[in-house]
Amino acid sequence: MPERKSQSVQPGSVESDPSISVVVLDGGPYIVRGAPPLHIQTITRNAQGQSWSYTQGREFPIKDKTALCRCGHSRNKPYCDGTHAKVDVDLTETATFEPMLNGAEEIDGPRYALTDNEHYCAFARFCDNGERIWNEVRIPGEEHAQLAVHMAHHCPGGRLLVWDRTTGLPVEQPLPVSLSLIEDPGAQASGPLVLRGGIRVQSANGESYEIRNRQALCRCGASSNKPFCDGSHASIHFRDGLE
């Protein structure tokens, strides 16, 4: 199905206004360029107890060059207060600059294909609905196909992409530019900083990561795939104290 080519913008994604970006400081916070909106978004569960949607909550002021905490220890979250310089947290970036598809597994179904790069799992668990997305994409029928699309589109880190097998194109709609602080009551944890709408993320070394429609950045300091979230916030029960 999809070709795994080296490129700066993921298929199905559109780069945001280039004046908006997130810059990773070496050993320090995220610096937001531009002024995208920043809200808390709480994962809401359905009647079966599975992650199903997001409920938007409190807004936080953002202006150009706002510094956001990524060590997990600021006393002024979501903003940086300089605590990273006083605590023993390794903020070294370890993520690859390769396109996400280079490390993705492909699963083919009758209508859609699914690509999955588990290194970018933010442990939001939208993928566990129904028979779970890896099975739903294989089951014939419109209901199963649309459930697979729903689950993929709610994946905050963009780990999951659904592809139309007829056109070979991603089933992905460009999203409005936004930043979100995820709250996850099901995991009893505060989750990542989610970037939507093709926001460019620049490494501390000046190189840009692949631009994607949905990205999740670590803000607990424990990810092994920094600057991206790998779900570690759930295992350490990170709480930001904002809710």
Image (tube, rainbow, N blue to C red):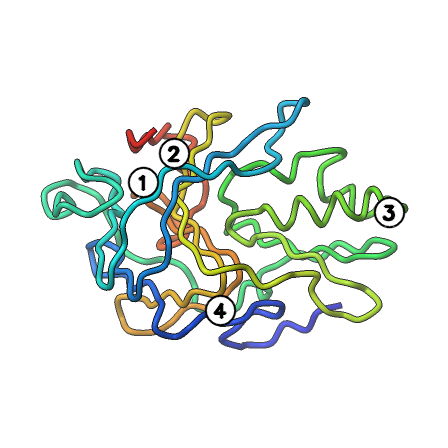
Question: Gap in Å between the C-alphas at discs 1 and 3?
Answer: 39 Å
In the image, is 118 to the left or to the right of 42?
A: right
Give the mark nearer the N terminus: 1 vs 3.
Answer: 3
Q: Find residue 220 and name its label.
A: 1
Left/right placement of residue 202 relative to residue 165 reads: left
**Which mark sits nearer the N-terminus, 1 or 4?**
4
Q: Specify the label residue 142 is tagged with.
A: 3
Badge 1 marks a residue whose secondary structure is: loop
Tell me whether the residue at label 4 lies in contact with that at label 3, contact meaning CB atoms closer than 8 angstroms.
no
Identify the residue at horizontal 78%, vertical 41% (top origin): 135
Q: Amino acid at mark 3?
A: Glu
Q: Amino acid at mark 1?
A: Cys
In this rendering, which labeled residue sits more in front, label 1 or label 4? Answer: 1
Q: Callout 2: helix, strand or loop?
A: strand
Whichever of callouts 2 and 1 sits on the residue coming sooner in the sequence is: 2
For marks 2 and 3 on the same chain, the one whose residue lies earlier in the sequence: 3
CA gap between label 4 and label 3 equals 34 Å
Q: Nearer the viewer, mark 4 or mark 3?
A: 3
Residue closer to the observer: 104 or 22 = 22
Q: Nearer the viewer, residue 213 or 57?
A: 57
Asked if disc 2 and disc 3 are in contact, CB closer than 8 Å, the reply is no
Residue for badge 4: 98
For the residues marked 2 and 1, what is the alpha-carbon distance in whole angstroms? Answer: 8 Å
Where is residue 241 shown, x and y percent of the image? Answer: 28, 29
Tell me which amino acid carries mark 2: Ser
Question: Which mark, by number, is residue 190?
Answer: 2
Mark sitting earlier along the chain (4/3): 4
The residue at the point 59 percent across, 46 percent down is 154
Instruction: Specify the quadrant of the image occupied by residue 32.
Output: bottom left
The answer for how far apart the CA atoms under marks 2 and 3 are is: 34 Å
Decide: is 186 above or below 85: above
Residue displayed at 66% across by 44% down: 151
